[in-house]
Image: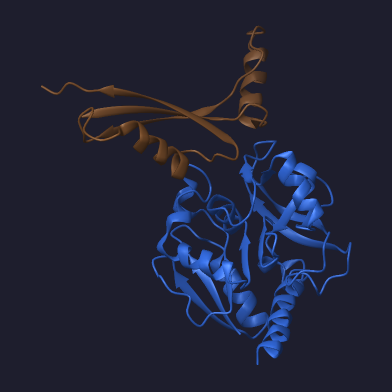
Amino acid sequence: MRWAVIVFPGSNADTEMYHAIKDVLDGDVSYVWHEETSLEGFDAVLLPGGFSYGDYLRSGAIAQFSPIMSEVVRFAEEGAPVLGVCNGFQILLEIGLLPGAMRRNQQLTFLCKHVELIVENNQTGFTSGYEAGEKITVPVAHGDGNYYCDDKTLGKLKENGQIVFTYAKNINGSIENIAGITNERGNVLGMMPHPERAVHTLLGSADGAKLFESMEREWRERDVIRT
Amino acid sequence: MITVQVYVSLKQGVLDPQGSAVKQSLNTLGFSEVEDVRIGKHLTLTIDAEEGEVDIEERVKQMCEKLLANPVIEDYEFTIEEVVTS
């Protein structure tokens, strides 16, 4: 399985993402600079956290037009797995692969701490390794993580089981405590907390590792069907 | 040359945490008449074109919808001004 970590000017969690795949899964992972135009040969795409383009205008607003992004859209539309963490989630919202938008945190402060999440849906290619309703500890580091969508969109998210992670305690004002959602098809996940920063007990938590292991298992099972 | 003033604001009904904090502060300073504050963005675009040459209004609308505003949470409006160059 080949993993791509997309790097934008201003990405800062790309190294952790790379490490999570390389050293935890012993996976085949490469950095892909945002000016590239092909994802040929890759099986999963990871959009890391950071401050792409300095968060100018809005978080993720400018990165959505990087050359690689039209290829990421094509990749996602083919059903391949795409994970966006933090700024990666914001980019997925801006480009419209996921519904809704981010507002400034309700209390206006940048949040950088470990938080408790609830796995709301473990029937996805990202969360099959977790128990339904399992509580996990993963760090957040964001200023614009206050998720918003209109009532109609919220209804659809609930109906389709697209709300994958919620905060056990609302930390930033997000509606319905939303911390992570998928698209309707379930192959694109965006989340504000950083699973790649919780892959070893030395980091304070290893609860994020199961997410990458779930992705790998999902790919293996699909690969068996393909061949 | 044409100057376009673009104003981007959060939609009514979308909570504006920055606006709320500023409102609180104004009230604390004694400006108790302030009932609501909404914070937006003001962009000034300088465009190399003459009025009537291209459909500026349509072009600016596209700019707002593609990049300058996020239609999920923001509204936009703009005014077009012709700049007389000497």
Colour blue maps to chain: A
Q: Which of B55 and A31 is in front in this view?
A: B55
- Residue A196 location, quadrant: bottom right
- Residue nearer the viewer, A135 or A205: A135
Q: Which of A109 and A30 is in front in this view?
A: A30
* As drawn, A85 above or below A177: below
- Residue depicted at 40% across the width and 63% down the height: A67
Q: Which of B71 and A68 is in front in this view?
A: B71
Which residue ends up furthest to the bottom in the rendered image?
A227
Residue A127 located left or right of residue A2: right
Image height of B55 relative to A60, above or below: above
Disc count in the image? 0
User: Which x, y percent locates residue A50?
Assistant: 54, 57
Which chain is in brown here? Answer: B
Question: Where's residue B33, x and y in %?
Answer: 65, 6
Residue A193 placement, left or right of A129:
left
Q: In this view, does B44 lie above or below A114?
A: above
User: Compared with residue A52, is residue B73 higher up or lower down, i.e. above or below?
Assistant: above
Residue B70 at x, y percent in the picture: 53, 41
